[in-house]
Amino acid sequence: MAIKIEKKITGYNVVKPEDKVAATPVTAAASKETTTAEVIQMHESVERPETLVGSTFKIKSPLFEHALYVTINDIVLNAGTPHELRRPFEIFINSKNMDHFQWIVALTRILSAVFRKGGDVTFIVEELKAVFDPRGGYFKAGGVYMPSIVAEIGSVVEQHMKNIGLIHDPEMDAATRQLIADKRAAYEQAGAKKKADVTAAPVGAASAATTPAETESSGFPPGATLCQKCNTQALVLMDGCQTCLNCGYSKCG
Ligand SMILES: [Zn+2]
């Protein structure tokens, strides 16, 4: 079938079998299917609209003299329809620090290209978070360990993808949540008891009872070590077994 092209060609795509199905003449029976086929997904020839919505995150790392500002802009596909989707479209990282300029530019260009390619782009989060700095990482507020600045950029991308509904936190089931709460209560009680035993004087016992276990700003007991599962300083020794008070991980199963 020959088709006369009236307009100037600005781009082209190879027709895939599923496109042929969508392009077949609309019959009464097929009309329902064609409406669902019109839902636009992210793909490499989606053009950038004039305006994009986005968020900017600030990263302050002891490895960097100046803060990094990470901006992720999203494209809204199928706006105003029940199929409205928000997908990351581009990423920019700004900093006063010029030492890292070239790799940051390279990273943001590649990430933006991955975003525009479409498909499942959430894999980049794990790729970035797995990068470690051989000079050592650092702890964030809340006791979360960042193995590198790249890993922190990865966690920012993850946070953004959670905000726009692209990544969903695995729902922690009620049983696990209860287990963690129980373990935590038991740990704090044990700590309070130990304290009371050491300072047997009535005054000491009273003060120990009011502060069951000192907790740092992170909310986990001091001396907690790094959990290898959730990268949080929340691993405590309970009944001779390393137990994480953040994710429930236990070395003894
Ligand atoms: Zn954990």
Image (spheres, helix red, strand yellow):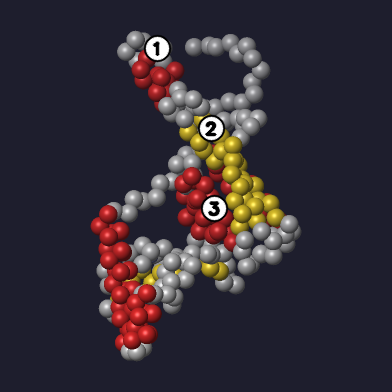
Q: Which mark is residue 76?
A: 2
Residue at image x 53%, y 65%?
A: 140
Which tag, 3 or 2, sits closer to the chain's start? 2
Type of amino acid at the residue the image marks with label 2 = Val
Q: CB at mark 2 closer than 8 A to ligand 1?
A: no
Count numbered badges in the picture: 3
* N-terminal-most mark, 1 or 2: 1
Q: For the residue carrying disc 3, how many other residues have a C-alpha within 10 Å: few (<14), some (14-19), or many (20+)?
A: many
**x and y, in percent, of residue 10 in the image:** 64, 24
**Residue 198 versus residue 13 in the image, above or below:** below
Q: Residues within 10 Å of mark 2 (few under 14, many from 20)?
A: some
Question: Secondary structure under badge 1?
Answer: loop
Q: Quadrant of the C terminus?
A: bottom left
Instruction: Determine which residue is flagged by label 3.
Output: 156
Q: Quadrant of residue 99?
A: bottom right
Q: Quadrant of residue 187?
A: bottom left
Which residue does the image show at 47% across and 71% down from the upper left?
A: 216
Q: Position of residue 69 (x, y in %)?
A: 65, 52
Would you say 113 lies left or right of 251 here? right
Q: Nearer the viewer, mark 1 or mark 3?
A: 3
Q: Amino acid at mark 1?
A: Val
3D distance between C-alphas at marks 3 and 2: 20 Å
Provide the residue designation for mark 1.
Answer: 26
Image coordinates of residue 249 in percent, x first then y, are: 33, 66
Q: Position of residue 152 (x, y in %)?
A: 55, 59
